[in-house]
Amino acid sequence: MSATVSLQQLTDQLESLEAEAAAAIAAAEDAAALEDLRVGLLGKKGRLSGVLGAMGRLPGDERPLVGQRANRLKDQVQQLLGARLEAVRSAAMAERLERERIDVTAACSYVPPGHRHPLQSTIEEIVDIFAGLGYRVSEGPEIETDHYNFSALNIPEHHPARDMQDTFYLGGDRLLRTHTSPVQIRHLEANPPPVRVIAPGRVYRRDAVDATHSPVFHQVEVLALDEGLDFSHLRGTVTTFLQQFFGDLPVRFRASYFPFTEPSAEVDVQWRGRWLEVMGCGMVDPAVLEGLGIDPERWSGFAAGLGVERFCMVRHGIDDIRRLFHSDLRFLEQF
Ligand code: DAH
């Protein structure tokens, strides 16, 4: 026996269900609570289903009235749920953004990144210029033998050139190289001509320290060996290099002497009105090539050597070579 039900009762129920649902949805705090409400209101066993179930007990012509009212209620509840869900989500996001806020203006502990030492950047600049002229970098050891440092470069024992390059002898015939010129020999032993190389590196001499001398310093060696190279190639290459490094300054070659070049020259640039000696150079002496088993009738070339500290000091107006080795940050941070 089923209790009778009137149209009025069902409409009242829908009416109060609507008011209740609106209040509950507005009060829901999060997505889970809204989902519970959705199931409780619109789900299979929910409140709306209950009302619709009772609809079957109405006279046939009244049912559509309740049905339409129920459909409107359903739409409205769905809309309220959707809007409220949107609202709680954005409130949750706002709360999270606030909680996880990062103050990008807060003071931090700054670790300066550091930078290249001026000697290193001078070497890199020199290497870059020669790379542009087609040269490759070659390197040799700082501990050399008497053979590579002197004899193979046409500096036999008791030659006066050895007095100018006193070094640190390590026992046996080992010594700390006094210049980068031995890399010429090592490179040619391992690489048949044609060659175009530069060899940057550290060198050593038994010199007392003063404003312009350091027992440890750096050189860059240049070597080109090919068919048909003559003094004009040497002159053009060295002048081009110097003018790229120092700017478009006058360059002058003065006759000089080195045991491993013939003829030899020293090169000056006119810097702030004064002639400054910056390089030694010359045509590779045929005796050096013969020592390597290279035919001097076929191959000729030129070599040059420069001191990196000098280039660095002139370029940056540094008054004392010792500043380059003392690691005083007040000095180094200027570069
Ligand atoms: N090795 C020489 C020195 O340390 C510099 C030098 C001069 C190198 C003339 C060369 C050169 O290659 O041709 O004093």
Image: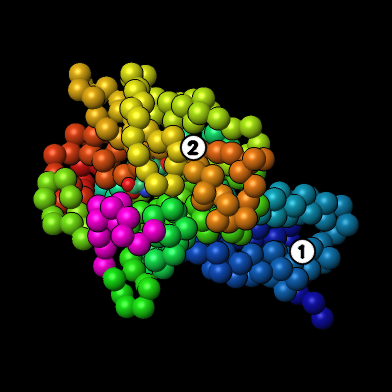
- Look at discs 2 and 1 and give the one toward the viewer: 2
Nearer to me, 73 or 179: 179
Quarter of the rendered structure image containing ligand 1: top left
Residue at (26% x, 40% y) in the render: 310
Q: Position of residue 88 (x, y in %)?
A: 49, 57
Amino acid type assigned to the residue bearing label 1 in the image: Leu
In this view, the residue in front, 95 or 268, is 268
Number of other residues with Cα within 10 Å of mark 1, as a class: few under 14, some 14 to 19, many 20 or more: some
**222 in relation to 155, above or below:** above
Q: Tell me what residue is drawn at x 70 percent, y 50 percent.
A: 75
Magenta-tinted stretch? 156-168
Asked if residue 242 can be seen in this view, the reply is yes
Q: Which residue is mark 2?
A: 283
Q: Residue furthest left?
A: 210
Which residue is farthest right? 60
The residue at which mark 1 appears reads as: 52
Quarter of the picture holding the N terminus:
bottom right
Residue 248, percent from left and from top: 37, 19
SS at circle 2? strand
Q: Amino acid at mark 2?
A: Met
Q: Measuring 83% from the left and 65% from the top, which residue is drawn there?
A: 56
Residue 264: x %, y % from top left: 40, 36
Classify residue 75 as left or right of residue 187. Answer: right
Residue 165 falls within the magenta-colored stretch: yes
Residue 109: image x %, image y %? 23, 58
